[in-house]
Image (tube, grey):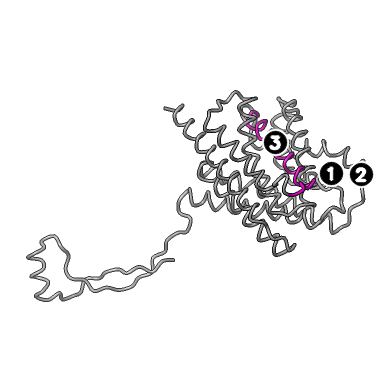
Amino acid sequence: MVVCRTAHAPADAGPLAGRRRGIYASAPPPLRSGLRLIRVPLLATKPARAIAWMALTGVLFVIVTGIVRHLGSDLPAVEAAFIRYAFGAALMAPMLARALHERLVPRRIGLYLLRGAVHGAGVMLWFYAMARIPIAEVTAIGFTAPLFTTIGAALFLGERLRARRVTAVVIGLLGTLVILRPGVEAIQPGALAQLAAAPLFACSFIVAKKLTDTESGAAIVAWLSVFVTLVLLLPALLVWRTPSVEELAWLFLTAMCATAGHYTLTRAFSLGEITLLQPFTFLQLVWASLLGMAAFGEVPTVYTWVGGAIIVGSASYIAHREALARRTQDR
């Protein structure tokens, strides 16, 4: 709500008003001011709503990260990932029923299986990393996924990779080196696991992009939960430890937040372009740092902030160049 000063014409403007009307023929009579409350709707524009959805997405994904960090390494990473995706598949049951109604077996089942395999491997590595390195560091290294997506799109989808984008990718990867500082500090296995997960998630994104040519968005999301659960089943059984009721409750909350996060991310992209939203992914590092400090006493280093900013800046530039290329093609 905004307080605005508005104007009201007096009943008797007096002789001065006549003089003013004579000098300024088009001017209104003298005004006496007053105050009136005008309701201005918040987030009235699409870009503002898109940014709000993106900020909420970051909060939800950081909550997921915090829960997995809280569970720690007591529960095997692959088992925790399997339980999370099993809960996710249950939450996706309505979308899955719709997909099954359309077609019992997906038309491009090979691509679905490929995506389930690479995404499942990425999830295992992410769960492993999350239990071993600070939340902010996991988040910052995860920002490299769009860089690997750019490389993969050029290699597998035939998209042109010009010099400016190559430069942006190289700069973004240098941002990763700022975070890891090889040769200065020993690189933690968790950091290596997260760095290995990034290209796997990028590959999953590329396959999903390919699937959108023939498949509905609901089917793509629903089948991902199913196939990742199936991929993780056998590895989880090999290291199975009966989880406690508390662990199951936390993992169910993880599935709920992750599912909600994918929904809010979809809403954000439906209202705004990636070029607008990509810089706001940096908010995830802010939320992750605050959560890490408040809940786990993890203070992010300046290298994490600088490296994360470099990576997000590079990814934002790549998104900007892609948007320009699309507009040129549409003309």
Residue 290: in magenta span: no
Residue 219 seen in the figure: no
Q: Amino acid at mark 1?
A: Val
Q: Amino acid at mark 3?
A: Pro
Q: Position of residue 129 (x, y in %)?
A: 77, 47
Q: Amino acid at mark 2?
A: Val
Q: Which residue matches tag 1?
A: 78
Q: Which residue matches tag 3?
A: 199
Dot 3 lies on which element?
Answer: helix
Q: Nearer the viewer, mark 2 or mark 3?
A: 3
Residue at 76% in and 30% down: 113
Image check: 331 left or right of 165?
left
Characterize the local packing of mark 1: few (<14), some (14-19) or many (20 or more) Cα atoms within 10 angstroms.
many
Q: Position of residue 152 (x, y in %)?
A: 65, 30
Q: Check contact, mark 1 vs mark 3: CB within 8 A.
A: no
**Residue furthest to the top:** 158
Magenta-drawn segment: 185-211
Characterize the local packing of mark 3: few (<14), some (14-19) or many (20 or more) Cα atoms within 10 angstroms.
many
Residue 208 falls in which quadrant of the image?
top right
Q: Position of residue 131 (x, y in %)?
A: 79, 52
Residue 247 seen in the figure: yes
Cα separation, mark 1 vs mark 2, equals 8 Å
Q: Check contact, mark 1 vs mark 2: CB within 8 A.
A: yes
